[in-house]
Image (tube, helix red, strand yellow):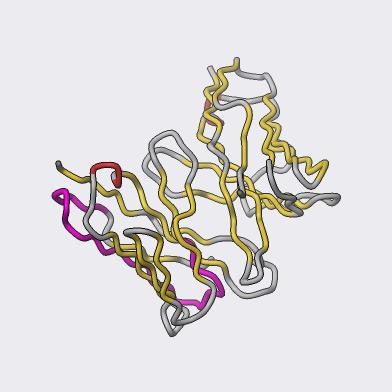
Amino acid sequence: GQQLNQSPQSMFIQEGEDVSMNCTSSSIFNTWLWYKQDPGEGPVLLIALYKAGELTSNGRLTAQFGITRKDSFLNISASIPSDVGIYFCAGQPPGGTSYGKLTFGQGTILTVHP
Amino acid sequence: GAVVSQHPSWVICKSGTSVKIECRSLDFQATTMFWYRQFPKQSLMLMATSNEGSKATYEQGVEKDKFLINHASLTLSTLTVTSAHPEDSSFYICSASAGTSYGETQYFGPGTRLLVL
């Protein structure tokens, strides 16, 4: 099946620093979604991207849908301790038997030191 | 908006018993819901796609007789783990698909922790 390569796998940063993570794919996607998951909880949607080249912000978070439709990045500015968690990218392929299904990246574990 | 609930949040059962997990979309209707399984420190693994009014579609390697899915209404899907065994212990998460004018988005429930003794 399709694979999403998400990097980095983990990040250890100081409070106040900016964070950047990205996902790349060998196949195109129609939608890119970024989620955050806290321990023992389900993923929470952070940002949804629907058009190639789209750049969207949600507070301190900014994400972009790559122009080739095969990649996306998420930036977090001025990190705070509550940003700690696992961040997942997810891509939704074009129509066909996989329509509606999400392919997930491996996740980026973010640790923020006060 | 776009809230998905799951019940129960955690369950402990004896080997051989069946466990039912409910997934509800609280403020929107979802013709499609998805069931995932997640092992510690790993990503989400799609088990099946639940379609309202029709049979679920299972991913390769997922036993349909083991994991029974019923999508009885536009706001409710249930996953029943039949004759559970310790290897079925896991974190099960559902999601519901919501359409916007831009495209489809999946919203996740809080998950159900299953421990089979």
Name which residue lies at 16% across and 53% down: A16
Q: Quadrant of the N terminus of chain A?
A: bottom right
| Relative image position of residue A101 (x, y in whole percent) | 61, 61
| Relative image position of residue B17 (x, y in whole percent) | 68, 19
Residue A25 falls inside the magenta stretch: yes
**Vertical relation: B24 (above or below) B30:** above
Q: Which residues are magenta?
A: A10-33
Q: Nearer the viewer, residue A48 or A30?
A: A48
**Vertical relation: A43 (above or below) A62:** above
Name which residue lies at 63% across and 29% down: B7
In the image, is A2 to the left or to the right of A112? right
Most extreme residue toward the right is B53
For the stretch drawn in magenta, the main secondary structure is strand
Name which residue lies at 44% across and 75% down: A65
Residue B109: quadrant of the picture: top right
Residue A108: quadrant of the picture: bottom left
Residue A91 falls inside the magenta stretch: no
Tally of numbered discs: 0
In the image, is B29 to the left or to the right of B47? right
Q: Quadrant of the C terminus of chain A?
A: top left
Q: Nearer the viewer, residue B26 or A22?
A: B26
| Relative image position of residue B110 (x, y in whole percent) | 53, 37
Q: Nearer the viewer, residue A82 or B86?
A: A82
In the image, is A103 to the left or to the right of B30? left
**Vertical relation: A43 (above or below) B20:** below
